[in-house]
Image: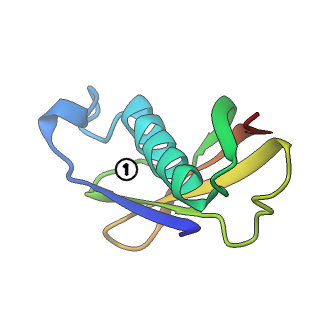
Amino acid sequence: MNRCVVFMKKRRAVTNHLKTVHAIAMCNMAELAGGLMTEVSLPQDKRWIPSGMTVKYLKKAKTNLTAIADGNELDWNKEGEVGVPVRIIDDNNELVFSAEIKMNIKTMK
């Protein structure tokens, strides 16, 4: 719990005209990692829905990628908006993308 790692192979289907991984492919990767980590980390009486995402494209993504969502520092009992951090690194362990996904957390009734 509190962590999710997603791998994506660089292949033609996820690249752009520059032959680098497309920005939206990295956004999808971040949302998958952040959403799955949130789902398994929340107490059973809570539910969530993403309400926004801020991203930074830091460098061209020229290799396979790894997205890491780490929620170890987050308070999963808090209600309201929680910022879930996700970072994406390349095969050289260099940061190519970062995101903060706002998750709206509520207690189920």
Q: How many marks?
A: 1
SS label for mark 1: loop
> What kind of residue is marked 1?
Ala
Q: Residue at position x 31%, y 68% from top?
A: 91
Q: Please state the horizontal and vertical placement of residue 95, each as a whole percent of the image.
A: 51, 63
Whether residue 106 can be seen here: yes
Q: Residue at position x 80%, y 63% from top?
A: 75
Identify residue for label 1.
61
Q: Please state the horizontal and vertical placement of residue 92, each as a whole percent of the image.
A: 35, 73
Is 81 located above or below residue 41 in the figure?
A: above
Is 46 located above or below residue 92 in the figure?
A: above
Q: Please state the horizontal and vertical placement of residue 105, each as a whole percent of the image.
A: 75, 40
* Closest to the observer, 98 or 29: 29
Q: Quadrant of residue 109?
A: top right
Q: Residue at position x 70%, y 39% from top?
A: 103
In this rendering, position of residue 29 left or right of residue 97: left
